[in-house]
Image (spheres, rainbow, N blue to C red):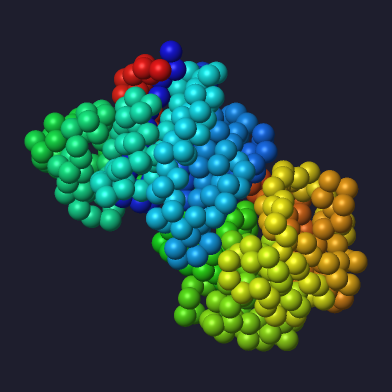
Amino acid sequence: MTRALMFQGTGSDVGKTVLVAGFCRLAANHGLKVRPFKPQNMSNNAAVADDGGEIGRAQWLQAMACRTPASVHMNPVLLKPQSETGSQVVVQGRVRGHARGRDYQALKPELMAAVLDSFARISEDADLVLVEGAGSPAEINLRQGDIANMGFATRARVPVVLVGDIDRGGVIASIAGTHTILPEEDRAMISGYLINKFRGDVSLFDDGILAIKGFTGWPCLGVVPWLKSAARLPAEDSVALERLVRGKAGALKVAVPVLSRIANFDDFDPLKSEPDVELVFVRSGERLPDDAGLVILPGSKSTISDLDDLRAQGWDRDLDAHRRRGGRIIGICGGYQMLGRTVSDPEGIEGGERVAAGLGLLDIETVMAPEKTVRKIVARSAPDDLPLEGYEIHLGVTAGPDCARPVTVLDGRPDGATSADGRVFGTYLHGLFGSDAYRTRLLKSFGLTGGSLNYRADVDAALDDIAIELDRLVGFERLLEASGPSAR
């Protein structure tokens, strides 16, 4: 029978995604058919699964850790925030609609059926399913109808490991407090806990383990230090952006403005990994750096709203100044749309303004359309015919004179637009910088050597490094003992 184990956190951003990815690779390295699963994810960092449709980028990474194709059933409910109060709801890879917070609560009983259906499908050919929770089970105000944490665990009879983040402080209180407020049925699902992101001498926490044992009775399954190799993995969501420190100094400074609804920002991870590149995420209230050689406008879940945000930050003036200094600008997906003359939303798909003036740096116009483009792509760069691989996730159709100079060829059709002088261009292709050959050519155009990094292989090696550490600190056998056979 299929074993399963769920990792839930005492709060958000405690490191569940990396732990699940690492344990997935550990189990795969021991010869198990292991699959990742996350019932509900809230993130604008999406990926296109191998069977079509959208899933959270984290589950795509975890599938890679399992050495298995990504499926929409690995993340059956994906919430993509479009505003402060509402999100696009994606169910089993397809857009279901838009829901505000209170409306979404009413949808949960129906969504639970989809979650359990996907979990059964994922479990069919697996020896082990490793499940990632969302947020915290301690949010007992959301327990009724819950599909993300204990609501799923109790329905599917999946044992739980609680993860506490010691780096943020208060880890003893967070674990003991979770035990205190959980109802008995939920508390009984927890087979133990992990301490994550420890720095220093682990033996200094021995008394902490004894204290937690006294408060909860739960065993400690391991104390995991800050895993350095995790920095080589794609970040899961915008929470991680807020904690990123300024990049190392490099010969080329690349600036990325952090828009309110930034999406798919892991597009830039391959550039961040290059030794000669300093990648700077520019936050609200900061200016785009004057010494940047390249500015990249990222994807956005709400293009028109983020255009307003960009202007409110004064980044439009910074871009104009950057352009006059001879700097280069690239737009990816929503960022590509912003570079044009106008962005129109005649049917109100994004839920706000119906038309907005673009930045006018490309002679193109974009019209939002109801049908969403979601597909994996095998592509080539248009100017030099280099191989590319990535995906499209976007609303909107873009056209205009500058499209006569495409950036890529996606499945045989031209994509993107380039200014007459070649200093500004945009494309709908996510994953552009993941091509080692293309990235090398781009860096050489700035006078850099490039070509020393195989990005995909480096991510794969990082997963192996994390698996080795988790095997030493927790152990494969302890992982299996905590999972137990499924009751399905």
Which quarter of the figure has residue 310?
A: bottom right
Front-lying residue, 351 or 49 = 351
Up/down of 1 relative to 464, above or below: above
Specify the quadrant that holds the C terminus. Answer: top left
Q: Residue furthest top?
A: 1
Q: Which image quarter: residue 289? A: bottom right
Residue 294 in picture, x, y percent from top left: 67, 72
Q: State the image coordinates of residue 134 (x, y, percent, origin top left).
A: 39, 45
- Front residue of this view, candidates 133 and 234: 133
At 35% from the left edge and 28% from the top edge, which residue is drawn?
Answer: 155
Q: Residue at x 49, y 79 (%)?
A: 286
Image vertical order of residue 280 relative to residue 11, above or below: below
| Residue 406 rendering spot, x and y as whole percentages | 85, 62
State the residue at coordinates (30%, 33%). 161
The correct choice, above or below, for 427 with respect to 66 in the image is below
Q: Quadrant of residue 269?
A: bottom right
From the viewer's perspective, tell me whether residue 202 is left or right of residue 125: left
In this orientation, which residue lies closer to the viewer: 248 or 176? Answer: 176
Q: Residue at x 36, y 17 (%)?
A: 487
The quarter of the rendered structure image containing the N terminus is top left
In screen coordinates, is 12 left or right of 434?
left
Circle count = 0
Residue 259 coordinates in the image, percent (x, y): 55, 69
Q: Is residue 330 visible?
A: no
Question: Does residue 285 appear in the picture of this structure?
Answer: yes
